[in-house]
């Protein structure tokens, strides 16, 4: 309570000091020196932050470090994914055999990601652990392609 009262008493004094500084700068005849005077005036928020009552404030905690790499967060929904960490394409291999896909198929990659096909179908020769590429499309779409084949499926990340 005492700190709040002393802060309220100091606040009008700082406003008067600011007014005096403005009047002093306004009286200068040269435009360049007047501008330099205005620039040299302390900002009101900085003056309040320098008061003893504000010095007892607790500093905010440091933000946690981002643990996920861009490849691990690729394809996650924006609510889960950090904005500053976005890859455009990832490369991996399909875990196991694949002979094609249709709508609803789930494709597991060697990096642990699981993708569900939402549009497109393809028939491929039976391939074991083929290289795959998942790339970002327009409007939040993702496309999976087996390297060396023309077929592309629109996918969403399940896991």
Image (tube, rainbow, N blue to C red):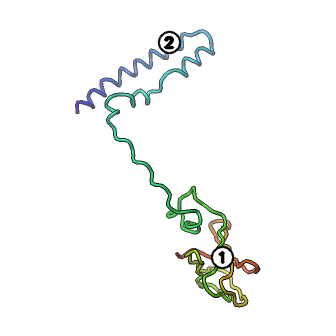
Dot 2 falls on a residue whose secondary structure is helix
At 62% from the left edge and 79% from the top edge, which residue is drawn? 118
Q: Is residue 147 left or right of residue 159?
A: right
Q: Residues within 10 Å of mark 1 (few under 14, many from 20)?
A: many
At which x and y percent is residue 87?
Answer: 63, 62
Q: Are marks 2 and 1 in contact (CB under 8 Å)?
A: no
Give coordinates of residue 22: x percent, y percent.
49, 17
Between the C-alphas of marks 2 and 1, the distance is 68 Å
Task: Answer left or right for 26 relative to 45.
Answer: right
User: At x 61% / y 86%, what residue is drawn?
Assistant: 96
| Vertical side of 124 occupied by 83: above or below | above
- 55 or 117, which lies in front? 55
Q: Residues within 10 Å of mark 2 (few under 14, many from 20)?
A: few
Viewport quadrant of the N terminus: top left
**Rendered image: mark on residue 24:** 2
Task: Please tell me whether mark 1 sits on a helix, a strand or a loop.
Answer: strand
Residue assigned mark 1: 154
- At 54% across and 10% down in the image, what residue appears? 27
Residue 36 locus on image (x, y percent): 58, 18
- Dot 2 or dot 1: first in sequence order is 2
Q: Which mark is residue 11?
A: none
Instruction: Find residue 38 and report its image quarter.
Output: top right
Q: Is residue 139 left or right of residue 20?
A: right
The location of residue 104, given as percent across then percent down, is 59, 84
In which quarter of the view is residue 129 placed? bottom right
């Amino acid at each position: 309570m005492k700190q709040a009262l002393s802060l309220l008493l100091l606040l009008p004094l700082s406003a008067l000091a600011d007014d005096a500084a403005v009047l002093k700068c306004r009286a200068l005849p040269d435009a360049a020196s007047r501008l330099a005077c205005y620039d040299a005036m302390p900002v009101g928020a900085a003056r309040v932050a320098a008061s003893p009552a504000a010095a007892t404030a607790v500093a905010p905690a440091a933000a946690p470090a981002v643990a996920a790499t861009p490849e691990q967060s690729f394809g996650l929904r924006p609510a889960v994914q950090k904005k500053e960490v976005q890859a455009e394409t990832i490369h991996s291999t399909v875990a196991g055999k694949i002979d094609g896909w249709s709508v609803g198929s789930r494709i597991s990659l060697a990096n642990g990601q699981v993708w569900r096909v939402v549009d497109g179908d393809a028939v491929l020769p039976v391939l074991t652990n083929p290289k795959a590429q998942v790339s970002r499309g327009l409007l939040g779409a993702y496309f999976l392609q087996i390297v060396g084949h023309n077929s592309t499926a629109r996918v969403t990340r399940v896991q």
